[in-house]
Image: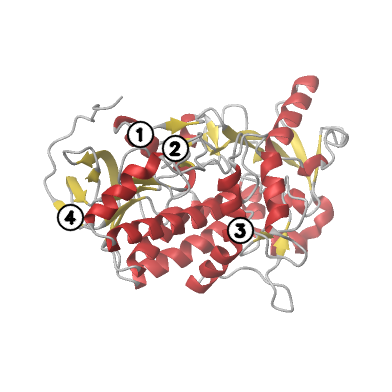
Amino acid sequence: MTGIRLQAPAPGWAVDADVVVVGSGVAGLTTALRCTAAGLRTVVVTKARLDAGSTRWAQGGIAAALGEGDTPEQHRDDTLVAGAGLCDEPAVHALVTEGPDAVRRLIATGARFDTERGGAIALTREGGHHRRRIAHAGGDATGAEISRALVDAVRAGGIRTVENALVLDLLTDSGGRAAGVTLHVMGEGQHDGVGAVRAPSVVLATGGMGQVFSATTNPAVSTGDGVALALRAGAEISDLEFVQFHPTVLFLGPDAEGQQPLVSEAVRGEGAHLVDADGVRFMVGQHELAELAPRDIVAKGIMRRMRELGAAHMYLDARHFGAAMWESRFPTILAACRAHGFDPVTEPIPVAPAAHYASGGVRTDLRGRTTVPGLYACGEVACTGVHGANRLASNSLLEGLVFAERIAATIAAGASAGSAGAAEAGTAGAAEAGAGAGMPAAG
């Protein structure tokens, strides 16, 4: 698909920068903050408002070996098992070893996580994890808190942003290296119409593509724009078939379409049970972790039981939590259920799987470099190899943090070495081991 471009007018305005970041979730804003801290002129462009992406919808939390007795090695093992043998182990090693400090830096940026009475970070458990290692905020509003903290930091840092901007295509120089992006600003803003941000480093952090499916947990902006841009630019894409379906999404009827309310895996982590209409816990005996098996196994278990009974959905039973726990630990989910006419305090919640996360995407190496020099990708748009065929619960926010920091460090190092060094770093993008699609190893 190299050479294909969207039909759009020539840019009517332009902005110059050292780095342009496309997307404003945890991956994009972390990249922007770290690049700015390194002295790079950074511009963030985003399809809607700064806080409108997938990050703010994340409920359960962020996984990292932060608890007593937990280790990166244990986190690695759970990640590899969930990935069904298709994870890239060097990428997983980077994630789990750098993850705890990345979370601490996020806290230093201003994110406030729930804590125990003694002040330690409160940790919960989710599917595929053998330990409680999920840090959460606001009970079940972790993504919203992370988004708030990062957006506040970006605004406080005076980082230039262009909102309501649909990215169109990658700009390249005569040598085929990234040179910026064209975009179309829709609605009110500092700019209007088709324009360009010219920069030698372009970071795609555009999120997923859940809106391709009729029922998804993804917001309306998740339409695969970053993957499409990368394809048109000639970048390699990998593992697009590995779309994870979340097992427990609030069932709103067979004709419901678009974004559906998520019922976090943390609800099962705190002791909720999956049951059929007769109250039978059908996941018991199917996996050693029962309802807390990896997501692909639980989603298949639900679909299997639905077919056996001719049912349109199963149920998640957490009535034993009581009203106080629901209100303090899962206020967002409680409100969503009640808004749709269900009360989890007094009745089981109807649930069914729905499209949730793209484990594949734009192929990158361990530094977030794609096969197009100067083009980087991180977060859900990227295929780093961390997730394999099935993402381990709450590894997504962590991946965004860790690989955003790696990208920023790589860009900063290239900039400090001068334009020749930056070009060399870009063309080496296909040479470093660790890409989730088997990039060839360099010496």
Do the residues bearing badges 2 and 1 touch, measured as CB atoms within 8 Å? yes
- Residue 106 horizontal side relative to residue 74, left or right: left
Q: Which mark is residue 148?
A: none
Residue positioned 40% across, 69% down in the render: 153
Q: Residue beneath label 3, please? A: 97
Please give the residue where the numbered disc 2 appears in the rendered image.
363
* Position of residue 90 measured from the top left corner of the image (x, y, whole percent): 57, 46
Mark 2 → mark 1, Cα distance in angstroms = 8 Å
Residue drawn at (75%, 33%) of the image: 314
Disc 4 marks a residue whose amino acid type is Val
| First in sequence: mark 1 vs mark 3 | 3
Q: Are marks 1 and 3 in contact (CB under 8 Å)?
A: no
Counting labels gives: 4
| Residue 152 falls in image quadrant | bottom left
Choose mark 3 or mark 4, whichever is in front: 3
Q: On the rendered image, what quadrant is the N terminus found in?
A: top left
Q: Where is residue 181 in the image (x, y as percent from the top left)?
A: 24, 44
**Amino acid type at mark 1:** Ala
Q: Do the residues labelled 3 and 2 touch (CB within 8 Å)?
A: no
Q: Give the label on residue 235, or none.
A: 1
**Amino acid type shown at disc 2:** Arg
The label on residue 15 is 4
Label 1 packing within 10 angstroms: few (<14), some (14-19), many (20+): many
